[in-house]
Amino acid sequence: MKSSTNKSENLKKSVDYIREAGKKKAQLICFPEFQMAYSPIGQSAKELLSIAENVHKGQFISTLCREARRSRLNVIATIYEKLKPEQNKSKYHNDRVSDTAVMITNQGQVKSVYRKLHLYDALGFKESNKLASGNKIIQPFRTPVGKVGLMICYDIRFPEMSRILALAGAEILAIPSAWVQGVMKEEHWQIMLKARAIENGCYVIAPDQIGNIFSGRSMVIDPFGITLLDMGAKEGMEIIEIDRNRIKSVRKSLPLLSNRRIDAYHDFDNLLA
C-alpha cells in the first residue's frame, strides 16, 4: 500500500481492499504500518497529532470495524493513536502519538491493541520526535488462520520479541511495516524476516509501504524460511494460504523451541534485564 498524506483517501483505499478480500473469501487481511497516513519528514509532532485518533472512538477504526463485520473478515490495521496522559510514556512532550496496530475480528470488534515498542531512532531517523513508544508485548490472539503475534517494523531487529511471542503460542508473526529505503536496507528486511520465521518455526506476514521513502517488498515467509510472497514495488493485494500443519511439521523436524538449553542461560539473565 502507498499511503498518501490524506487520511480520508487512505481510509477509502483500505475499505476497498477489505471488500475485495471479502469477495475472495479471505479470512485475514493485514495492512502495513502508517496505513492511516504518510507522515513526511518535515511534518511536526503537533501536525501529526491533529490527524491521530482514539482506537475505540475514532472514525478510522470504527469504519474498518464496520467493514470487517460486513465482509466477515479479520483485519490487522494500523493508526496514529491519540494517547491519554497516563499512556504517554514519552520523555519529551504530550504531543507524541502511538504507532499502533489493531486487531479487528470478523464480528467487527477490536480484539487486541499493540503500541510499537521499538522506535526507529537509527540510521539517521528519529521516530521519537513524533512518536511515543509502547511499553508491553501483547499476548498472541486466535484467528481462523492461526494464533497471531503482533510486531511493527523496527521490532524485527530485536529477536527477543519474536521469540517471546512464539513461546507464548504465536504461529504467525504479523509485522505491519514502513521499511525505509537505504543502503543494504532491502537485504536486512529479507534476511531478518526469514530469520524470525526460521528460528521460531512460524509464518511471517510482513505488509510494507511502497513509494515515498519506503522500500516495498511486502513478504510472506513460511516456517522453514521459504518465501511464499514477495510483492516487490507492486501496490495491491495477494492471497496466501496458511497451513497450520506446516507449522507443526517444521517444529517437529527442526525443534528449535524445545531444543533451547534454558538451564545454561540463567547465568546471563542479568544481561536481559
Image: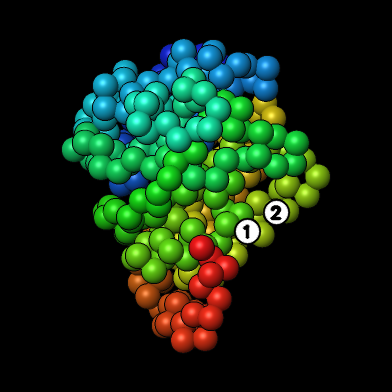
SS class of the residue under badge 1?
helix
Q: Is residue 255 left or right of residue 271?
A: left
Callout 2 secondary element: helix
Q: Residue at position x 54%, y 13% from top?
A: 47
Name the residue tied to disc 2: 188
Q: In the rendering, at what x and y percent does residue 68 appear?
A: 27, 33
The spot of residue 80 in percent (x, y) is 45, 27
Seen in the picture, residue 2 relative to 31 is either above or below; the reply is above
Q: Quadrant of residue 246?
A: bottom left
Residue 37 appearing in the image: no
Residue at image point 53% right, 70% down: 270
Q: Nearer the viewer, residue 60 or 205?
A: 60
Front residue of 103/57: it is: 57
Q: Is residue 211 above or below residue 118?
A: above
Image coordinates for residue 227, horizontal then vertical, percent: 58, 60
Tell me whether circle 1 and circle 2 mark residues in contact (CB < 8 Å): yes
Q: Which mark is residue 192?
A: 1
Residue type at mark 1: give it: Met
- Which residue type does callout 2 highlight? His
What quarter of the picture does the N terminus occupy? top right
Front residue of this view, candidates 80 and 86: 86
Furthest residue toward right = 183
Say the numbered circle drawn on residue 271.
none
Image coords of residue 59 (percent x, y): 31, 18
